[in-house]
């Protein structure tokens, strides 16, 4: 992406924000044994996916270096589950609904770039894969199985750290202030969006799968959203909206998040303000996120290794 395109993208976010308005712990010391080098997988299998942010803007990886993918391994083949965001050199933030039913040993985090190399030239691969060693989520989430959008937040601890000194590949998001109110401000949600419906393609042939891998897995998509009042959100939502939910909407026609964008971050000026809840590609309902500012105690306790009864560890 050229500098001009980056400028146009930022301008587009600003214009979207104006239009929507007119309408309606890094200093913590980790004492665990660690290595500064993440595992560079040059023979990574094809990543199986469904669909992503629809009609969002394609952007360069350097714009969203905090974005990661959470994957489940089955016979060493990774399947994309959700998005996530780096909050610390050892931890990422994602949705509890993405990971609560899996063993940590079966999870892996992909980071460090989204422009994947062609399978025939693996030496150009810039991404890194990080094994998950622990999963944390609020016990309240497990106690509300019929309301999986509530307390939908999880932290994954990885074995190999994110080298935050390499700012060409990694960048962490900033945590919000306690009970910060972002009503009326814009944010950006990111994921891996297709240009058309994958289901219409034949993907049972190796070449088709390879083409799909090159066309979709290599692209980060971003969607500008404006945070709306919870009262307005409740009028259009099919679930109960609480103070721990943050709702947002876009003014871009036919643009929305979709399957497996879940767990992705809603970011405002480098601050992560929301985590995308389970999504069913419904354009009639607002985008709903877990309000991160309501869970700072949970995040702080995990990062400081103060695990209490109200935190489930796997």
Image (cartoon, grey):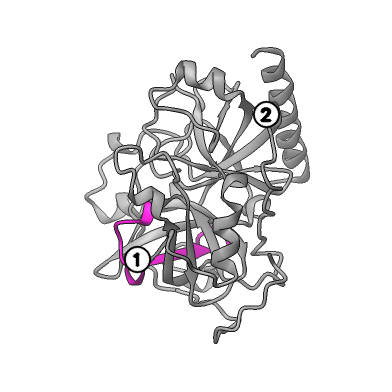
Please provide the residue range marked out in magenta.
98-117
- For residue 45, the mark is 1
In magenta segment, residue 61 = no
Residue 67 or residue 4, whichever sits in front: 67
Q: Residue at x 50, y 32 (%)?
A: 242
Crowding near the residue tagged with mark 1, few <14, some 14–19, many ≥20 C-alpha atoms within 10 Å: few
Residue 23 or residue 221, whichever sits in front: 23
Q: Give the image location of residue 202, x and y in percent.
A: 25, 42
Q: Give the image location of residue 131, x and y in percent.
A: 43, 73
| Residue 9 against residue 141 in the figure, above or below | above
SS of the residue at dot 2? loop
Residue tagged 2 = 183
Seen as rendered, the residue at the extreme bottom is: 33
| Residue 134 against residue 272 in the figure, above or below | below
Is 135 placed left or right of 17 in the picture? left
Q: Give the image location of residue 275, x and y in percent.
A: 52, 44
- For residue 170, the mark is none
Q: Give the image location of residue 123, x and y in percent.
A: 51, 74
Are circles 1 and 2 on residues that touch, CB within 8 Å?
Answer: no
SS of the residue at dot 1? loop
Q: Residue at x 60, y 21 (%)?
A: 251
Seen as rendered, the residue at the extreme left is: 204
């Amino acid at each position: 992406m050229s500098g001009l395109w980056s400028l146009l993208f930022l301008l587009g976010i600003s214009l979207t924000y104006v239009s929507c308005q007119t309408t309606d712990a890094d200093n913590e010391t980790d004492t665990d044994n660690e290595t500064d080098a993440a595992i560079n997988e040059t023979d990574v299998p094809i990543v199986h996916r469904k669909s992503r942010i629809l009609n969002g803007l394609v952007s360069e990886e350097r714009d969203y270096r905090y974005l990661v993918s959470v994957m489940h391994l089955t016979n060493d083949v990774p399947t994309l589950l959700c998005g996530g965001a780096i909050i610390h050199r050892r931890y990422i933030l994602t949705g509890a609904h993405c990971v609560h039913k899996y063993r940590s040993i079966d999870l892996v985090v992909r980071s460090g770039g989204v422009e994947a190399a062609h399978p025939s030239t693996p030496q150009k691969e810039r991404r890194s894969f990080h094994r998950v060693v622990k999963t944390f989520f609020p016990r309240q989430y497990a106690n509300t199985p019929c309301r999986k959008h509530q307390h939908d937040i999880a932290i994954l601890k990885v074995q190999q750290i994110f080298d935050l000194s390499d700012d060409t590949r990694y960048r962490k998001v900033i945590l919000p202030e306690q009970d910060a109110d972002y009503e009326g401000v814009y944010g950006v949600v990111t994921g891996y969006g297709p240009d058309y419906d994958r289901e219409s393609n034949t993907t049972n042939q190796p070449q088709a799968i390879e083409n799909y891998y090159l066309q979709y897995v290599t692209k980060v998509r971003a969607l500008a959203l404006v945070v709306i009042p919870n009262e307005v959100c409740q009028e259009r939502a099919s679930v109960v909206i609480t103070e721990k939910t943050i709702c947002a909407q876009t003014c871009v026609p036919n643009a929305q998040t979709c399957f497996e964008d879940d767990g992705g971050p809603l970011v405002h000026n480098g601050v992560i303000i929301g985590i995308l809840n389970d999504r069913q590609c419904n354009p009639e309902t607002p985008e709903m996120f877990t309000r991160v500012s309501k869970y700072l105690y949970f995040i702080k306790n995990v990062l400081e290794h103060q695990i209490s009864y109200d935190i489930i560890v796997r």
